[in-house]
Image: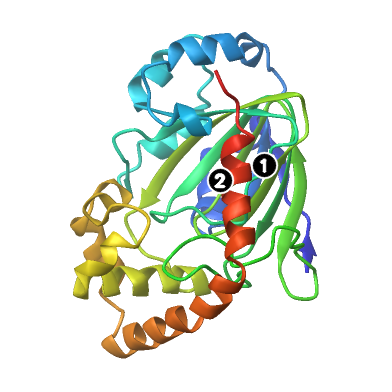
Protein backbone atom coordinates (compact mmCIF):
# COMPACT_ATOMS: atom_id res chain seq x y z
CA UNK A 1 0.00 0.00 0.00
CA UNK A 2 1.26 3.47 -0.86
CA UNK A 3 1.16 5.59 2.29
CA UNK A 4 1.16 9.35 2.90
CA UNK A 5 4.01 10.54 5.09
CA UNK A 6 3.16 13.01 7.85
CA UNK A 7 4.63 16.50 7.57
CA UNK A 8 4.65 18.70 10.66
CA UNK A 9 6.05 22.20 11.11
CA UNK A 10 8.77 22.22 13.76
CA UNK A 11 6.96 24.98 15.67
CA UNK A 12 3.90 22.75 16.03
CA UNK A 13 5.68 19.61 17.22
CA UNK A 14 6.68 19.13 20.85
CA UNK A 15 9.53 16.79 21.64
CA UNK A 16 7.22 14.66 23.79
CA UNK A 17 4.82 14.19 20.87
CA UNK A 18 7.70 13.27 18.58
CA UNK A 19 8.92 10.62 21.03
CA UNK A 20 5.51 9.06 21.65
CA UNK A 21 4.10 9.25 18.13
CA UNK A 22 7.17 8.65 15.96
CA UNK A 23 10.43 7.79 17.75
CA UNK A 24 9.12 4.98 19.96
CA UNK A 25 6.72 3.50 17.35
CA UNK A 26 9.52 3.88 14.78
CA UNK A 27 7.38 5.69 12.22
CA UNK A 28 8.82 8.03 9.56
CA UNK A 29 8.13 11.75 9.70
CA UNK A 30 9.11 14.92 7.84
CA UNK A 31 9.61 17.93 10.11
CA UNK A 32 9.59 21.23 8.24
CA UNK A 33 11.55 24.37 9.11
CA UNK A 34 10.37 27.62 7.54
CA UNK A 35 13.44 29.71 8.47
CA UNK A 36 16.14 28.33 6.22
CA UNK A 37 18.51 31.31 6.09
CA UNK A 38 21.16 29.40 8.05
CA UNK A 39 21.03 26.59 5.52
CA UNK A 40 22.01 28.91 2.68
CA UNK A 41 25.42 29.48 4.25
CA UNK A 42 26.40 25.85 3.67
CA UNK A 43 27.95 25.82 0.21
CA UNK A 44 29.77 22.96 -1.52
CA UNK A 45 33.02 24.92 -1.12
CA UNK A 46 32.51 25.26 2.63
CA UNK A 47 31.61 21.59 3.05
CA UNK A 48 34.71 20.47 1.17
CA UNK A 49 37.05 22.72 3.13
CA UNK A 50 35.39 21.92 6.46
CA UNK A 51 35.64 18.15 6.01
CA UNK A 52 38.77 17.88 3.89
CA UNK A 53 40.52 15.63 6.41
CA UNK A 54 37.58 13.25 6.82
CA UNK A 55 37.39 9.80 5.26
CA UNK A 56 34.97 8.52 2.63
CA UNK A 57 35.49 11.57 0.39
CA UNK A 58 35.81 9.24 -2.58
CA UNK A 59 32.21 8.06 -2.30
CA UNK A 60 30.72 11.45 -1.61
CA UNK A 61 30.07 11.55 2.11
CA UNK A 62 32.02 12.66 5.14
CA UNK A 63 31.87 11.38 8.72
CA UNK A 64 32.30 13.86 11.55
CA UNK A 65 32.27 13.91 15.32
CA UNK A 66 29.19 15.44 16.93
CA UNK A 67 30.61 18.36 18.94
CA UNK A 68 32.37 20.21 16.10
CA UNK A 69 29.21 20.08 13.99
CA UNK A 70 26.95 21.36 16.78
CA UNK A 71 29.41 24.16 17.53
CA UNK A 72 29.86 25.10 13.86
CA UNK A 73 28.04 28.41 13.35
CA UNK A 74 27.33 27.58 9.72
CA UNK A 75 25.72 24.19 10.40
CA UNK A 76 22.14 24.19 11.66
CA UNK A 77 21.55 21.42 14.20
CA UNK A 78 17.82 21.36 15.12
CA UNK A 79 16.86 21.15 18.80
CA UNK A 80 15.02 17.89 18.20
CA UNK A 81 18.26 16.37 16.92
CA UNK A 82 20.28 17.55 19.91
CA UNK A 83 17.67 16.25 22.39
CA UNK A 84 17.48 12.88 20.69
CA UNK A 85 21.24 12.38 20.55
CA UNK A 86 21.42 13.16 24.28
CA UNK A 87 19.00 10.37 25.24
CA UNK A 88 20.14 7.67 27.65
CA UNK A 89 18.54 4.82 25.68
CA UNK A 90 20.71 5.14 22.59
CA UNK A 91 24.25 4.40 21.50
CA UNK A 92 26.36 6.78 19.42
CA UNK A 93 29.27 5.86 17.19
CA UNK A 94 32.36 8.10 17.48
CA UNK A 95 31.36 9.96 14.32
CA UNK A 96 27.55 10.06 14.15
CA UNK A 97 27.25 12.91 11.63
CA UNK A 98 27.38 12.46 7.87
CA UNK A 99 27.47 15.24 5.31
CA UNK A 100 26.42 14.36 1.77
CA UNK A 101 27.20 16.22 -1.46
CA UNK A 102 25.64 14.75 -4.58
CA UNK A 103 24.97 15.78 -8.16
CA UNK A 104 21.65 15.74 -9.94
CA UNK A 105 20.68 12.33 -11.29
CA UNK A 106 22.46 10.49 -8.49
CA UNK A 107 20.53 7.47 -7.23
CA UNK A 108 21.13 5.17 -4.28
CA UNK A 109 20.59 1.44 -4.57
CA UNK A 110 17.80 -0.13 -2.50
CA UNK A 111 19.11 -0.83 1.00
CA UNK A 112 18.47 -0.39 4.68
CA UNK A 113 21.11 1.06 6.97
CA UNK A 114 23.34 -1.29 8.94
CA UNK A 115 24.06 -1.13 12.67
CA UNK A 116 20.31 -0.84 13.39
CA UNK A 117 20.53 2.93 13.06
CA UNK A 118 17.79 5.53 13.24
CA UNK A 119 18.56 8.70 11.34
CA UNK A 120 17.65 12.33 10.87
CA UNK A 121 18.30 13.65 7.36
CA UNK A 122 18.20 17.43 6.82
CA UNK A 123 17.90 18.77 3.29
CA UNK A 124 20.26 21.74 3.00
CA UNK A 125 20.41 22.38 -0.74
CA UNK A 126 18.49 20.92 -3.65
CA UNK A 127 15.68 18.38 -3.69
CA UNK A 128 15.56 14.62 -3.27
CA UNK A 129 12.86 12.07 -3.98
CA UNK A 130 12.59 9.24 -1.47
CA UNK A 131 10.96 5.82 -1.67
CA UNK A 132 11.06 4.15 1.75
CA UNK A 133 9.62 0.70 2.39
CA UNK A 134 8.36 -0.72 5.66
CA UNK A 135 10.48 -3.39 7.38
CA UNK A 136 7.24 -5.36 7.75
CA UNK A 137 6.97 -5.72 3.96
CA UNK A 138 10.69 -5.82 3.15
CA UNK A 139 12.47 -6.27 -0.13
CA UNK A 140 14.48 -9.49 -0.56
CA UNK A 141 18.03 -8.98 0.65
CA UNK A 142 21.49 -9.95 -0.54
CA UNK A 143 22.64 -12.79 1.77
CA UNK A 144 24.26 -11.51 4.98
CA UNK A 145 23.87 -7.93 3.76
CA UNK A 146 21.51 -4.94 3.93
CA UNK A 147 21.36 -4.47 0.13
CA UNK A 148 18.17 -5.15 -1.76
CA UNK A 149 18.27 -8.28 -3.89
CA UNK A 150 16.53 -6.61 -6.83
CA UNK A 151 17.23 -5.43 -10.37
CA UNK A 152 18.39 -1.88 -11.05
CA UNK A 153 15.02 -0.99 -12.60
CA UNK A 154 13.04 -2.45 -9.69
CA UNK A 155 9.96 -0.45 -8.66
CA UNK A 156 8.16 -0.78 -5.35
CA UNK A 157 4.47 -1.55 -5.98
CA UNK A 158 1.49 -1.02 -3.66
CA UNK A 159 0.31 -4.60 -4.21
CA UNK A 160 3.35 -6.08 -2.47
CA UNK A 161 4.82 -3.39 -0.22
CA UNK A 162 3.87 -0.71 2.27
CA UNK A 163 5.88 2.36 1.31
CA UNK A 164 6.11 6.14 1.24
CA UNK A 165 7.06 8.14 -1.85
CA UNK A 166 7.83 11.82 -1.25
CA UNK A 167 10.21 14.71 -1.95
CA UNK A 168 12.33 16.70 0.48
CA UNK A 169 13.43 20.29 -0.09
CA UNK A 170 15.57 22.75 1.93
CA UNK A 171 14.37 22.90 5.52
CA UNK A 172 12.87 19.39 5.54
CA UNK A 173 14.15 17.09 8.29
CA UNK A 174 13.33 13.42 7.68
CA UNK A 175 13.20 10.97 10.58
CA UNK A 176 14.05 7.59 9.03
CA UNK A 177 13.69 4.72 11.53
CA UNK A 178 15.92 1.67 11.45
CA UNK A 179 15.37 -1.14 8.97
CA UNK A 180 13.35 0.90 6.45
CA UNK A 181 14.55 0.18 2.91
CA UNK A 182 15.18 3.37 0.97
CA UNK A 183 16.01 4.51 -2.52
CA UNK A 184 16.89 8.18 -3.00
CA UNK A 185 17.00 10.22 -6.21
CA UNK A 186 18.77 13.60 -6.42
CA UNK A 187 16.55 15.99 -8.38
CA UNK A 188 18.58 19.22 -8.32
CA UNK A 189 21.90 20.08 -9.93
CA UNK A 190 23.67 20.08 -6.55
CA UNK A 191 22.33 18.49 -3.36
CA UNK A 192 23.60 18.80 0.21
CA UNK A 193 22.25 16.88 3.20
CA UNK A 194 23.29 16.41 6.82
CA UNK A 195 22.59 13.07 8.44
CA UNK A 196 22.67 12.32 12.20
CA UNK A 197 22.57 8.62 13.12
CA UNK A 198 22.24 6.61 16.33
CA UNK A 199 21.41 3.08 17.43
CA UNK A 200 18.68 2.37 20.00
CA UNK A 201 20.03 0.39 22.95
CA UNK A 202 17.00 -1.92 22.73
CA UNK A 203 16.14 -4.31 19.87
CA UNK A 204 13.00 -4.39 17.76
CA UNK A 205 12.27 -7.91 16.60
CA UNK A 206 8.62 -7.17 15.89
CA UNK A 207 9.44 -6.37 12.26
CA UNK A 208 10.75 -8.89 9.73
CA UNK A 209 13.98 -6.98 9.11
CA UNK A 210 14.51 -6.26 12.81
CA UNK A 211 14.25 -9.97 13.56
CA UNK A 212 16.57 -10.82 10.67
CA UNK A 213 19.15 -8.34 11.95
CA UNK A 214 19.06 -9.86 15.45
CA UNK A 215 19.32 -13.39 14.06
CA UNK A 216 22.31 -12.45 11.91
CA UNK A 217 23.99 -10.84 14.92
CA UNK A 218 23.58 -14.04 16.93
CA UNK A 219 24.93 -16.10 14.04
CA UNK A 220 27.95 -13.80 13.85
CA UNK A 221 28.41 -14.31 17.60
CA UNK A 222 28.34 -18.10 17.23
CA UNK A 223 30.32 -18.19 13.97
CA UNK A 224 32.81 -15.29 14.06
CA UNK A 225 34.15 -16.30 10.64
CA UNK A 226 31.02 -14.74 9.13
CA UNK A 227 32.22 -11.34 10.32
CA UNK A 228 34.63 -11.40 7.39
CA UNK A 229 31.77 -11.50 4.87
CA UNK A 230 29.30 -9.28 6.73
CA UNK A 231 29.24 -5.51 6.31
CA UNK A 232 30.01 -3.54 9.47
CA UNK A 233 32.48 -4.29 12.23
CA UNK A 234 31.07 -6.66 14.84
CA UNK A 235 33.06 -5.19 17.75
CA UNK A 236 31.90 -1.66 16.88
CA UNK A 237 28.26 -2.52 16.21
CA UNK A 238 26.04 0.47 16.93
CA UNK A 239 28.93 2.24 18.61
CA UNK A 240 28.82 -0.16 21.57
CA UNK A 241 29.82 -3.54 20.14
CA UNK A 242 29.22 -6.60 22.31
CA UNK A 243 27.41 -4.61 24.99
CA UNK A 244 24.54 -3.74 22.68
CA UNK A 245 24.71 -7.01 20.73
CA UNK A 246 23.92 -8.98 23.90
CA UNK A 247 20.65 -7.08 24.26
CA UNK A 248 19.75 -7.55 20.62
CA UNK A 249 20.27 -11.33 20.53
CA UNK A 250 19.05 -12.44 23.96
CA UNK A 251 15.61 -13.57 22.70
CA UNK A 252 16.87 -15.32 19.56
CA UNK A 253 16.96 -19.12 19.70
CA UNK A 254 19.42 -21.49 18.04
CA UNK A 255 16.57 -22.86 15.93
CA UNK A 256 15.86 -19.36 14.61
CA UNK A 257 19.54 -18.97 13.78
CA UNK A 258 19.57 -22.25 11.87
CA UNK A 259 16.48 -21.27 9.91
CA UNK A 260 18.01 -17.87 9.16
CA UNK A 261 21.18 -19.50 7.83
CA UNK A 262 19.08 -21.64 5.51
CA UNK A 263 17.20 -18.55 4.31
CA UNK A 264 20.42 -16.66 3.57
CA UNK A 265 22.08 -19.55 1.72
CA UNK A 266 18.88 -20.20 -0.23
CA UNK A 267 19.16 -16.72 -1.79
CA UNK A 268 22.74 -17.15 -3.03
CA UNK A 269 21.73 -18.49 -6.50
CA UNK A 270 19.37 -15.53 -6.91
CA UNK A 271 22.19 -13.19 -5.89
CA UNK A 272 24.50 -14.73 -8.49
CA UNK A 273 21.81 -14.27 -11.13
CA UNK A 274 21.51 -10.56 -10.25
CA UNK A 275 25.19 -9.94 -9.55
CA UNK A 276 25.64 -7.58 -12.51
CA UNK A 277 22.65 -5.47 -11.49
CA UNK A 278 23.91 -5.30 -7.91
CA UNK A 279 27.43 -4.41 -9.02
CA UNK A 280 26.23 -1.71 -11.42
CA UNK A 281 23.94 -0.29 -8.74
CA UNK A 282 26.79 -0.01 -6.26
CA UNK A 283 29.10 1.48 -8.89
CA UNK A 284 26.44 3.98 -9.97
CA UNK A 285 26.03 5.06 -6.35
CA UNK A 286 29.77 5.66 -6.02
CA UNK A 287 30.52 7.26 -9.38
CA UNK A 288 27.53 9.61 -9.29
CA UNK A 289 28.59 11.32 -6.08
CA UNK A 290 30.12 14.76 -5.77
CA UNK A 291 33.83 14.78 -6.54
CA UNK A 292 36.54 17.23 -5.66
Farthest residue in the bottom direction?
Answer: 255
Q: Secondary structure at mark 1?
A: strand
Residue at figure coordinates x 53%, y 53% from the top left:
177
Residue at figure coordinates x 67%, y 11% from the top left:
37
Label 2 packing within 10 angstroms: few (<14), some (14-19), many (20+): some
State the quadrant of the N terminus. bottom right
Asked if 262 appears above or below 142 in the picture, the reply is: below
Q: Which residue is mark 1?
A: 30
Residue at figure coordinates x 71%, y 70% from the top left:
161
State the quadrant of the C terminus. top right
Marking on residue 18: 2
- Earlier along the polypeptide chain: callout 1 or callout 2? 2
What number of labels is visible? 2
Q: Secondary structure at mark 2?
A: helix
Does residue 88 appear to the left or right of 104 in the view shown?
A: left
Nearer the observer, disc 1 or disc 2? 1
Marking on residue 268: none
Q: Residue 105, image x and y in percent?
A: 75, 36
Amino acid sequence: MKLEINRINANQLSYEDFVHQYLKPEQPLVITYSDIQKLKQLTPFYIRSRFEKETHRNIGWFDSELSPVIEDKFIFTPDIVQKTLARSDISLRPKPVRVWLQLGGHKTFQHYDGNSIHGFNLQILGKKHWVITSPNTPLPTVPFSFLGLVKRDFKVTPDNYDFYSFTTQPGDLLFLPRYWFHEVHCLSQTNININWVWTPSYPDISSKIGKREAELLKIRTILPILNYVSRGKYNDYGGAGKKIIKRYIRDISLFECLFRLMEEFYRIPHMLWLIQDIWHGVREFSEGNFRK
